[in-house]
Image (cartoon, grey):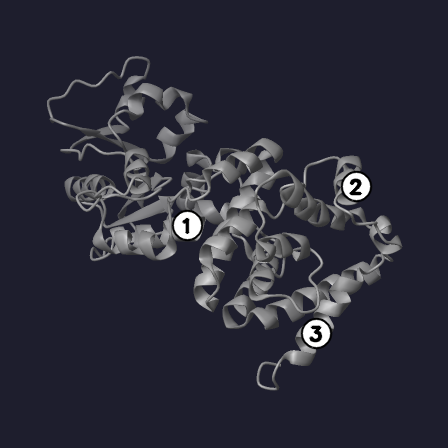
Amino acid sequence: MAGGKIGIFGGSFNPPHLGHRKLAVTAADALGLDRVIVMPAGIPPHKVPVAFAGAKDRVRMCELTFAGDCRFEVSTLEIDRGSRSYTVDTLGVLREQYPGDELYLITGSDMLETFKQWYKWEEILSLAYVCTAVREKSAVLDYSGFTDEQRKRFIPVEADPIEISSTQIRRMLADGGDVSAFLDGGVIEYIKENGLYEDRFPDYRRLVESKLDAERLNHSFGVSRAARKLALKYGANADKAELAGLLHDVMKNAPKEEQRRVIEAGGHKLTAVELANSKVWHAMAGEAFLRCETDIDDEEILSAVRHHTTGAAGMTLLDRIVYIADFISEERDYPDVETVRRLADESLEKAIIYTTTYTIRDLAAKGLPIHPDTVDCYNDILINMTEKEV
């Protein structure tokens, strides 16, 4: 609506809690906002710890937290951007989308202490009013260092905060504490149903943290979450799926010489095809490393790690889940990823046919050898699918 007043309320929302909702509602009421855009942040890979819920999970929890008030809508603008998000960039996009409206950036009470450290903070003030929560209208805020014109862009909003942080809530959840006073009931159920914020495998988490770079670590956490969700959907052991997803790339960042040494120490002699395509080594090295250097002795988990890249004939349900989870984890952004996600929601087998077909065509087009396991995987899945599934 032209000439309207739009609030922007951003944060990691990991998870969103009742304090967030109270601040946003208070600001909307005090400023007479027509709508408030709730903006979950796109978290850069180098900042993503295992305790972070996935982007889709944080979006859904925001939808549950802010449901029931028609002024609020949840935006995926920053998440969809797929890279480091700066407030000034988000405001710039919103200014283009709503040229006739006034923008109001809703922030916490401690914002002024660090505002001048924000990227392009002066431009932020030119794009939006900055609304700061205060305990009392008479509170004295430190605007030293700002010009008179800049000070006019700050609007204090009286708010009685709920003294809790998302970090504290995550700790309470991990310890099995009662968070009903701090989270919407729907959010609590969502967290339970999806197994969020439980550090079920701290020793193995530390292992992959010690062996993988930030980008690969982010991917491994994403695959573990995707594998757990697929396991819950298709009736596999969710803990096994999550652990296999966490460990699947444990040797990915190891030098090729080390990968080969670990593979051969595990009793496997590389074939001519494998020697010609070292991209498949990390999966074999991962299985051998876990078998020889850790206490992982579950053959299903070891098999899922071994086959997550090439696939194989006769894959177990867990094999299939981790294989597909590797394709659809939330940080994946290749052109066909949404197609694979849709197929995975319909049938693991349909998703595997699609991905193995792509892999075979891609390798052939590049003149690279195709691992026999990938061909066997395609044939086995295709032959055993019913006419209806095909």
Nearer to us in this view, 37 or 186: 186
Which numbered disc covers residue 380? 3
Separation of residues labelled 3 and 2 (CA atoms):
28 Å
Q: Is residue 169 above or below residue 380?
A: above
Q: Quadrant of the C terminus?
A: bottom right
Q: Amino acid at mark 3?
A: Asp
43 left or right of 318 in image: left
**Taking the image as drawn, is residue 226 in sight?**
no
Q: Quadrant of the N terminus?
A: bottom left
The residue that mark 2 highlights is 260
Which tag, 3 or 2, sits closer to the chain's start?
2
Q: Identify which residue is drawn at 19% across, 47% down.
A: 180
Q: Amino acid at mark 2?
A: Arg
Q: Quadrant of residue 261?
A: top right
The residue that mark 1 highlights is 97
315 left or right of 166 in image: right
Q: Callout 2 environment at 10 Å: few (<14), some (14 to 19), or many (20+)?
A: many
Q: Identify which residue is drawn at 56% across, 61% down.
A: 318
**Taking the image as drawn, is residue 150 in sight?**
yes
Q: Is residue 187 above or below residue 159?
A: below
Q: Is residue 117 above or below residue 80?
A: above
Q: Callout 3 environment at 10 Å: few (<14), some (14 to 19), or many (20+)?
A: some
Please state the horizontal and vertical placement of residue 14, each as a whole percent of the image.
35, 42
Q: Identify which residue is drawn at 21% across, 53% down.
A: 185
Which tag, 3 or 1, sits closer to the chain's start?
1
Which tag, 2 or 1, sits closer to the chain's start?
1
User: Which secondary structure lies at badge 2?
Assistant: helix
Separation of residues labelled 2 and 1 (CA atoms):
53 Å
Quick one: which residue is furthest to the bottom in this view? Answer: 387
